[in-house]
Image (tube, helix red, strand yellow):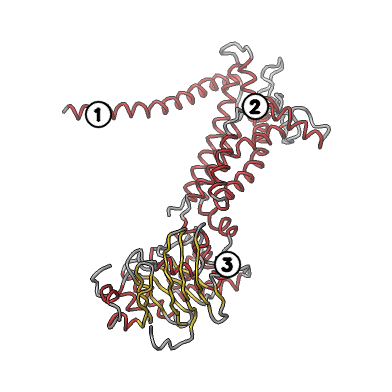
Amino acid sequence: MRRHLCERSIEASLFLAALASVAITLGIVGVLTYESWGFFQHVPLSEFLTDSQWTPLFSEAHYGILPLVSGTLVTTVVALLVAVPLGTVTAIYVSEYASLSIRETVKPILELLSAVPTVVFGYFALLFVTPLLQRMWPDLPGFNMLSAGLVIGVMIIPYVSSVSEDAMRAVPMLIREGSYAMGASRFQTALRVVVPSALSGIAAAYVLAISRAIGETMVVAIAAGMQPTLTLNPLEPAATLTAYIVQVSLGDLPHGSLGYQTIFAAGLVLLIITLIFNIAGHFLRKRFHHAF
Amino acid sequence: MPTNLSSPLKADVKHLSFFYGTVQALKDITLPIAGNHVTALIGPSGCGKTTYLRCFNRMHDLYPGNRYEGQIVLYPEGINIIDPSVDPLAVRMRIGMVFQKPNPFPKSIYENVAYGLRIRGATQRNQLDEKVEQALRGAALWNEVKDRLHHLAFHLSGGQQQRLCIARALATDPEFLLFDEPCSALDPTATSRVEELLAELKQRVTILIVTHNMQQAARVSDFTAFMYQGQLVEFDTTKTIFTNPANQLTEDYVTGRFG
């Protein structure tokens, strides 16, 4: 009887621990939705989704989310153009080519890259990468999305490479040997057999990287400028969803004002975008998952 | 030694030794392989028969620290295929292998079979179609899969997957096929299908098969080699090995007294 009671209490406390994170997630979604609800009482959804300006703090206020979404989109795409090829190639090299000693050296160094504080990356973008790019394009503005995107790309390489590499290394040696036995080279085996076998894990790595790039705040806040501009040109300055939230959160907006509520509306949009990618990632994983 | 290796040799193994790092796994093996016949390798677990088989397609080259000594002379050219100057890829282009467990690639049935052709640079659709069909027919799988060639190979049963792997190996017209306990993961029905296949295949290719199953060796092979602790104990016609072996150790093994 006592043992039974003991079991039950352990089970209950484990359940509570699991419940906590679920409850916190629901709480965040709840607060975001509640405050956004207040926002949408004043701003019609049609204006929010179609207006091409986002100037909630100006006297002539506009509440179009598109400029922030475009800023997020552009920096994310630039970042992925860097991180996906470099990260994937790194993963293939480390998993399929590198000797044990090289692997043991490269992996920790790569993981160190994700240990660098993002604020350092932000200043690196502003004070090093941008001047470098300005040598190529002299009329590039001091704040621009290209430089921020490139640096975010470098920053998320470890996310792509380490998760993809784990996925590739999990491919059984028997499958590789099957390819080698057919006379395939290392490169053919890596590209035609190992990568397709690890596709679900690689897709998961990409989704993780996308979410990370979309959510990245410090680098864009520092290096991309903070003016919401509806543009798809990475050479221009613009604000992202995250940069806007930082900017407004640091100001002294009265609690409950419309300006205050814009933070939650932007946050909700951010959450929905990352949620879409996570759901897409989930289906990709299921679609390409091979049980060996 | 069998007195009448009637057909010409496909390979001649001379004083082959093999080392995993400092551990010697094969000790001075000399063994001729008759062309267009099935040679079976039997022996207790850990006797080195798989290690021996994997020397033929230089599989050991994939892992660092492995070393061969001696010669495996491949005919008709008479080149020593374990010589470091010989490209292992070129060897594997000629000598196919079927593994203990079916290992299809995460591709369609069609693309699995076409794999070897594609890495040899084949792109012409009708040529590929023809070769794929031929190989699947050769592996007695065509009738079961012809309507779903573009389905994932993982959806096949274990026995079908193993025949798919045989088709994959056949598609590139190898001269020599290595089978590493190809039926150990299959049920009796699938096993007998693979065994029938071996009998057909030897019309065209030379076969070296490792097996745990002595009945299987007796059923499918023309010659049998008995290995023990990295050494070749006895090699002769299958009939002699199973009915009148010269060595006491061989007799004990084939009659099930140990192993």
Q: Which amino acid does label 3 sit on?
A: Pro
For the residue pair A108 and B146, the one nearer the viewer reads as A108
Name the secondary structure under disc 3: loop
Residue B243 position, x and y percent, is: 27, 82
The answer to whether one can see residue B258 in this image is: yes
Rendered residue at 48%/72% (across/down): B136
Does label 3 lie on the same chain as label 1?
no
Residue A121 position, x and y percent, is: 65, 29
- How far apart marks 1 and 2 lie (CA) works out to 49 Å
Quadrant containing the N terminus of chain A is: top left
Quadrant containing the C terminus of chain A is: bottom left
- How far apart marks 1 and 3 lie (CA) works out to 66 Å
Name the secondary structure under disc 1: helix
Query: Which is closer to the viewer, label 1 or label 2?
Result: 2
Q: Which amino acid does label 2 sit on?
A: Val
Q: Which chain carries label 1?
A: A
In the rendered image, the vertical position of residue B157 relative to residue A73, given as above or below: below
Does label 2 lie on the same chain as label 1?
yes
Q: Mark 3 lies on which chain?
A: B
Residue A19 position, x and y percent, is: 37, 27
Q: To which residue does mark 2 refer? A: A120
Residue A16 position, x and y percent, is: 34, 26
In the rendered image, the vertical position of residue A82 relative to residue B84, given as above or below: above
Q: To which residue does mark 1 refer? A: A8
Rendered residue at 54%/30% (across/down): A271
Say left or right for A190 vs A4.
right
Q: To which residue does mark 3 refer? A: B84
Q: Which amino acid does label 1 sit on?
A: Arg
